[in-house]
Amino acid sequence: MFGLTALELARIQFGFTISFHIIFPAITIGLASYLAVLEGLWLWKRDTVYRDLYHFWSKIFAVNFAMGVVSGLVMAYQFGTNWSYFSAFAGSVTGPLLAYEVLTAFFLEAGFLGVMLFGWNRVGPGLHFFSTIMVALGTLISATWILASNSWMQTPQGFEIVDGIVVPVNWFEVIFNPSFPYRLAHMTIAAYLSTALFVGASAAWHLLRGNDNDRVRTMLSMAMWMLLVTAPIQVVVGDLHGLNTLEHQPAKIAALEGHWENKPGEAVPLNLFGWPDMEAETTRFAVQVPHLGSLILTHSWDGQVPALKDFPPEDRPNSTIVFWTFRIMVGMGLLMLLLGGWALLQRWRGVLYRSRPFLHFATWMGPAGLIAILAGWYTTEIGRQPWIVYGVMRTRDAVSNHSALTMSVTLVIFVVAYLFIFGIGTRYMLKLVGKGPETGEDEPTGGSSSAARPARPLSAAPDHPDATEQARS
């Protein structure tokens, strides 16, 4: 079905489910830290603006957190159903790392999430603030273990292969593999940028519709300061990550640059645009900047890097795809820098909250961080091909023995179910955002009744986006 092999369908299915999942944890990481900052400012300044923003964004955090948990469960099952040979081969490494996430991050979040979401008037302010910090820390610990596992697949070390099975011999090397620090920093900053853009777009949207108050202005101001500071840092981290990838996965760098061959004594140009043709082994319609590739990749005027033709055809990633996913990611990053700089200019001119062109741009930039994360993730994962564990196990040897028909049917089921379930959840969350923060935001009570006893994170959000307003009226 679809004219694709079972392997290709298995990859598409996992890529589809992880594309949904990665969005929610990214926002969860950013919002958890944002809530910790808001509560800290409330305790410090006793300004009700920060308290109201905390209660407003905690409802959205609860919905997002719930969708992240649900989408993550499916991925864990897919390792056994669709990638059983990989699980049998490398499960002694990836299994414990995922278990460590449960034992540390999930237990930490489970212990303090209820206090954070429902304990504002039930525990002391110090304990509540501590609970918020612990939840924020839990999201970062969760990202640490997940990226340790995935980074090991990118740059494996600290293991031996005994009887065809991976056996870890040095857990420090397994966890702190060569790409792990760069990928952890890159992903964490991306989560903060995505959340800042989300919060900033929400504020800009309200300002454009005349909902101008201290809470909305504070949202926009904090988001733009965060963007101004972190976007340039992300550029530096991205450069370091690229140099690390060049050292350990040179074929990936050659593919995302569409660089096919080196000419003796010539510098590497940068292909701004073009269409890499895998069969013709050339990048068609290339728009090049001489020497810029050497400057970026080697930090020298005429340095050379490995080219795609230096690798056997069967070991080359699909340059046609990663060439463009990489440029989408970089393009979103450049737009973030532009938005941060424009915000600083508008702030200096005193029109940050009134400039409609700027507010429209900030609104349209709301999903830019998530788009960049998805494009970057595709670049990383597709660029690793044809390896599932780089240089150790090929993807074709990792997939389960399912027929193309089976994979096609399950893929269709996943698409329909995900669009329905997460479509409803996302629509509900955006309705909450559209309601906007108000003076005297109530603490979540687990439903429309103040006597309700919440039993799950989603209870922190009202049964209906207008429930709070209906209760007030």
Image (cartoon, grey):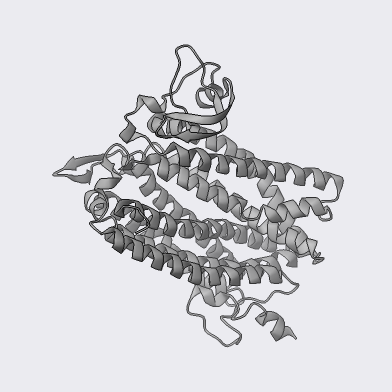
Q: Residue at x 35, y 43 (%)?
A: 152
Relative to 162, is 38 above or below?
below
Residue 50 vs residue 290, the one in the foreground: 290
Residue 144 x, y percent position in the rendering? 43, 50
Q: Residue 458: give x, y in percent of width and height.
A: 52, 74
The furthest residue to the right: 350
Pick the quarter of the image with the N terminus: bottom left
Q: Quadrant of the C terminus?
A: bottom right
In the rendered view, tell whether residue 43 sits above or below residue 174: below
Which residue lies at the image location 54% right of the left edge and 72% below the top edge? 424
The one nearer the camera, 375 or 60, is 375
Residue 206 higher or lower than 472, as above or below:
above
Residue 66: where, in percent of width, then height?
49, 69
Quadrant in the picture for residue 353: bottom right
User: Would residue 222 be visible to someone looking at this image?
Assistant: no
Q: Nearer the viewer, residue 187 or 320?
A: 320
Farthest-out residue, left: 163
Which quadrant holds residue 233? top right
Q: Could you say where residue 16 lies in the image, as x and y percent from the top left?
A: 43, 57
| In the image: residue 39, left or right of residue 318 | right
13 on left or right of 233: left
